Amino acid sequence: MFDPKDLQNMLGSVQEQLKEMDAKAKEKVIESKSGGGLINVQFNGAGELLDIEIDDELLQDKQSLQILLISAINEGYKQMQEARQDDVFEQIKNMNPFKF
Amino acid sequence: MFDPKDLQNMLGSVQEQLKEMDAKAKEKVIESKSGGGLINVQFNGAGELLDIEIDDELLQDKQSLQILLISAINEGYKQMQEARQDDVFEQIKNMNPFKF
């Protein structure tokens, strides 16, 4: 028989483990470049932008600067999301709330 | 009596509605500024950076440029996440999978 308390316990345990995952994500660093390294950005695994490095050359060309920034940031953000999804799947695989 | 199929149907319906929410999020535009408007950034609600506008003044001061970029982007990203969370809660409130 199904006990609603099982579902409640499961959701509580999932929440706990997601919190733990978030703390670990903040320690991860994800790097992304554009323009052959003229722009370098760093995210942590929780999606916070930690650093942007701009090559002096780009200060002469605002159009390229803006385009390359958008490109590096979106690429880094995508990588961060993928890493995060992998972590979620890994976590789900390991949590097995129903103890099958 | 609890029927496991109910849980399966519920999860399917949740997945469907999350997909729909994602499509809607892409149409939303979130703006963020820093340095009193020297930097302007635009995200869509799905976390994609759409545009960065840099005031010419900042091209003379790379240090400030980098700091103000990080600040505007993280602020916009935070706003985007908050909007997203509100959408999730709204969606959960409306979905009522158990038909109470």
Image: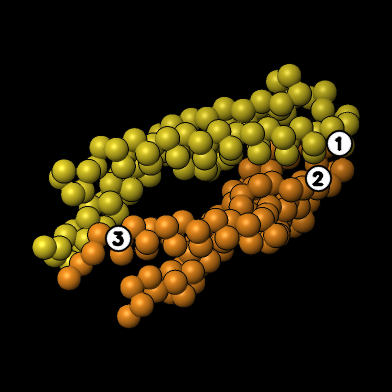
Chain colours: A yellow, B orange
- How far from the left and from the top, in percent, is residue B86? 51, 67
Q: Is residue A48 left or right of residue A68?
A: left
Protein chain holding label 2: B
Circle 3 chain:
B
- Expressed as whole percent of the image width and height from the top left, the position of residue B30 reads 68, 59
Packing grade of label 3 (10 A; few <14, some 14-19, many >=20) is few
Q: Amino acid at mark 2?
A: Ile
Residue at image mark 3: B5
User: What residue would you read off at disc 2?
Assistant: B54
Q: Residue at x 68, y 32 (%)?
A: A72
Residue B2 seen by the camera:
yes
Q: Horizontally, is A51 left or right of A96 in the view?
A: right
Residue A1 marker? none
Whether labels 3 and 2 belong to a single chain: the reply is yes
Residue A67 location, quadrant = top right
Q: CA distance from mark 3 to mark 2?
A: 54 Å
Q: Are marks 2 and 1 in contact (CB under 8 Å)?
A: yes
Mark 3: which secondary structure?
helix
- On the image, numbered disc 1 is attached to which residue? A62
